[in-house]
Image (tube, rainbow, N blue to C red):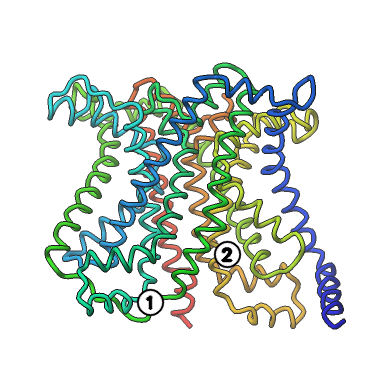
Amino acid sequence: MAKNQGAALDRKKFFADPIMVTTICVLIAFLTLFILYPLAILLVDSFVTPEGVSLSIFQRVLGMSSFRKAITNTLKVGFLVGIASALIGLLFAYVEVYVKLKTRFMAGLFKVVSMLPVVSPPFVLSLSMIMLFGKAGIITRFLLHIYDNNVYGFWGIAIVQTLTFFPVCYMMMRGLLKNIDPSLEEAARDMGASRWTVFRTVTLPLVLPGLGNAFLVTFIESIADFANPMIIGGSYDTLATTIYLQITGAYDKEGASAMAVVLLTITLLMFIVQKYYLEARSTATLSGKASRQRMLIEDRSVTIPLTILCSLLALFVVMMYVCVPFGALFKTWGYDFHLTTKWFKQVFTKYKGFKAFKDSFVLSLIASPITALLSMIISYLVVKRSFKAKGFIEAVSMLAMAVPGTVLGIGYIRGFSAGVFRTGFLQGLYGTGAILVIVFIVRSLPTGTRSGISALRQIDKSIEESAYDMGADSFTVFMTVTLPLIKDSFLSGLVTAFVRSITAISAIILLVTPRYLLITVQINEFAEKGAYGIACAFATILIAITYSAVLLMNLVIKYFGTSKMYKEE
């Protein structure tokens, strides 16, 4: 009886807050309209024919040998990249957490390697791979005198994706290894076990769920990747590139929708396993922090080989990224290495560089604060409030993480150029800057939401309850109490959303019209044409913009963030 009365009181209190109710309704409408609706349209396109509900479209698509080959290719690349990235990430994390590094240079190098994939476009390493190891590559042609090296295809995609995604695994594994209690491993050492035996029988079983989690995250990223296979894949088609070519080359929207559903099914299954099984197991295995500081390994037989191996890998990654600005400064890559600024000049004089940077910058700048604020609001509702639609909001906002950009792009084409909204404002969205901003928001929302949820779970409920007891409504509490306490997470989400938006390509390449010029689309276009000087010039300026944004965020957090507030107090 008392429980029912308490629930009734909570409902009454909830509905007495119109701002909260309105916010929840707007969020549900936004998530339904711009995440669930495009995916539902894909399902309708795939199953509904003029004759009624049928599997004929899937039968036609699966009967195409090119599509079956693309599925096989995608899974092969995904498994190899997932395994390689998880193992290299574990190696880097183990060296940082367990091994005593002699110099600060190594720690700095690791930090640079972990940041570079975040602040650069997703296909920069493909450009570098072609310029270093292609037929006119500096290493293959000029150092090794190999004139017919083919860098395109399976191995090209696998190497580039591994170098792009392993830093994500490294950051995941670093957190897990830091949480292992050193006493567990030291007890095994005291009983005479070798370091290899301790790693194999104690450390590895503890991080195995986390390693599986890292594998699945990378696997999903790999099979959803569009830009790298498009540039360095050659004739080796993956699902993402096949879907793109099916809608842009064959103009087969129904077939492309069915292909997109197949890719979405694979990524969703992997996402569910990763999110609700392996992530939970990883948290349960390693709960809390290590009880005391770990004694770092100083044995030279361990430190020297591991440090050399990690240093070589890290320096190779850095060299790949450094190759891009040099590609923009050489007169003709592979033939004439005299320095010139002509490519940078042509970016702005011949190829409408000012418009490309302005459009990309403005659209990303509009999307980033909206994304950051939405992420924090969703995080606040999920962590701090209790209502029936909470599970729906959390699940759908995270769902975008599992939806490949190509799939989302086709969903938006089918949903907003035809679909239910054939007339009116929503139909008018297609081909406008507004739909690009919405795509940016949807793609970046899961990252910001996860960050916000982690930050909010560290705030004591009593702080906000005091404000409610003094008569403040939910909006006032959120803006004056909650948001200032998580401002670091908000600023981080803001910059992350900006960087992800300005470097995005997989979804927007299907939605952008001649009315807008976007940097990533320009880079992709020139790279496909073999105009590497122009592509590198665009990419170099883009990396400078994104890196500056990250540095600016770090400065703002340092001088105005939550930690600064606590120091002043």
The local secondary structure at tag 2 comes to helix
Q: Quadrant of residue 164?
A: top left
Q: Nearer the viewer, residue 538 or 213?
A: 213
Image position, residue 445 (x, y; %):
58, 51
Q: Quadrant of the N terminus?
A: bottom right
Vertically, is 512 above or below 310?
Answer: above
Q: Quadrant of residue 94?
A: bottom left
Instruction: Locate residue 264 relative to residue 284 in the image: left or right.
Output: right
Q: Which mark is residue 453?
A: 2
Residue that badge 1 annotates: 290
How far is disc 2 from disc 1 in space, using C-alphas?
23 Å
- At 29% from the left edge and 57% from the top edge, which residue is drawn? 92
The amino acid pointed to by label 2 is Ile
Image position, residue 74 (x, y; %):
45, 33
Q: Quadrant of residue 462?
A: bottom right
Q: Residues within 10 Å of mark 1 (few under 14, many from 20)?
A: some
